[in-house]
Each structure stands twice: as C-alpha cells, then as structure tokens.
Image (cartoon, helix red, strand yellow):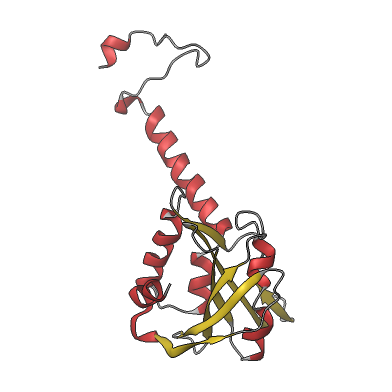
Amino acid sequence: MARIALRYFHNKVKFWRTPTPIHVSSRLAKEALSLGNISLSDGETIAVYEVELNEKVDIERNRHGIRDILTTDWRNMGYAGAFVFGYRKNESVLRFSYVSETWGFNKQGEYEKVSTDTMRYTYLLGEGRGCRTAIDQFSTLKNSKQTLADITEAFSVEALTKQFYGELFDWYLWAIDPVTGVSFPNNTSIEDDDREDIRNKD
C-alpha cells in the first residue's frame, strides 16, 4: 500500500515512522492502522489507512462497511478524505476504497456537502481480479495536478463507465466501417461460421 502511494504521489506522501493503531469496530476489523497522509496541490489532505478485516466480513460484497469504517477518524483529524486498503490475512484479494467529504457551493450558489458514493469509488484488487482499471487510474493521477477533484474524477466508477462505453462505441463505428473489412456471423446461436463471401473478405 505504501509503495502504491509513493509510486504515484512521490513527495506529497508522508508516512509515519510507526503506523498508528486506530480503534474500530471489532465486528468488522481485527486491526486498523493509520499509515500517513497525502498532501494535495489544492491544499487538501487525505489519510491513508490499512485495515485487517475479520474473517466474517465478505470483502467482495461489504463495500459500505469497509468504506465507512474509518470515516469518524479522518473527519476528526480534519482530512478531506482517505484511501482505505482492506484485506484479510492469507488472502490474495484486497479492497481499495476512496472516500471523501467536503463542503462547497453548488451551481445554484447553495452551500452543501459533497461526498463520494458508496458504490462508485471502491475496487477489488489482487489475484484473479481485473485490477488493471484501478492501476490505470493511479497512472492517470500521476500526470495530473493531483487535486481532490482529480482523485474523485479518476476513481469514479460512473466516469469510468462512460469512458468504457465511449471506447466501445468508437470500436463499433470502426467495426461497421466497410473500409476495415470486418465481417460478422449472420446467426450467432450456431457454431458454424455462416458469413457470406467470407473468403472474399480475407
């Protein structure tokens, strides 16, 4: 976890000499440690935590509980958000969650709380998982101004979904363009290739 933060945030990262134990609900975790913080270019700071979950916690499904397990701590410390890495001992899968909560003016000039959604800023990483997405987003951050808004945009599943469908649509336009010479079966429910004049398209 420390290596990930250092790799992408460099000198903005500050780690404690000794990780600080944080009191959390034993229903969810065996141990929680504050590893340090990351100072962002907009003046905001986010905390970095590592949490050893207990055996009864379903790391794949319990997104809300893992996300909120340390909210009270980082709020009380004056942080704008946190990176939380949750894992279970002897398992190769961990859950990475980004959570933040700030106050600001909306487009209507109203002062309101802006916080990350439970379902949109959390990823499973590790063996057999499609963790490429999260790593790619860290890489995107490396080349950004590294503000809180940059982090929120980078790890928003909604934004990534829009990006995915945009790329999928671009591929579709490419595939149906006669210039590409791509052909598709007429009937996808059978194994035999029934494309017409397929030899002429090779």
The answer to whether residue 124 is above or below residue 23 is: above
Could you tell me residue 106's position as x and y percent? 68, 77
* Residue at x 40% of width, y 78% of height: 145
Splitting the image into 4 quarters, where does residue 100 fall? Answer: bottom right
Question: Which of the image's four quarters has the C terminus?
Answer: top left
Observer able to see residue 116? no
Q: Which is nearer the eye, 69 or 143?
A: 69
Q: Which is nearer the eye, 10 or 185?
A: 10
Query: Would residue 80 be found to the left or right of residue 127 on screen?
Result: right
Question: Which of the image's four quarters has the N terminus?
Answer: bottom left
Could you tell me residue 29's position as x and y percent? 64, 71
* Residue at x 43% of width, y 51% of height: 127
- Total marks placed: 0
The answer to whether residue 158 is above or below residue 107 is: above
Splitting the image into 4 quarters, where does residue 157 fall? Answer: bottom right
* Residue at x 64% of width, y 67% of height: 66
Could you tell me residue 68's position as x and y percent? 67, 72
* Residue at x 45% of width, y 50% of height: 130
Observer able to see residue 66? yes
Could you tell me residue 57's position as x and y percent? 66, 60
The answer to whether residue 106 is above or below residue 125 is: below
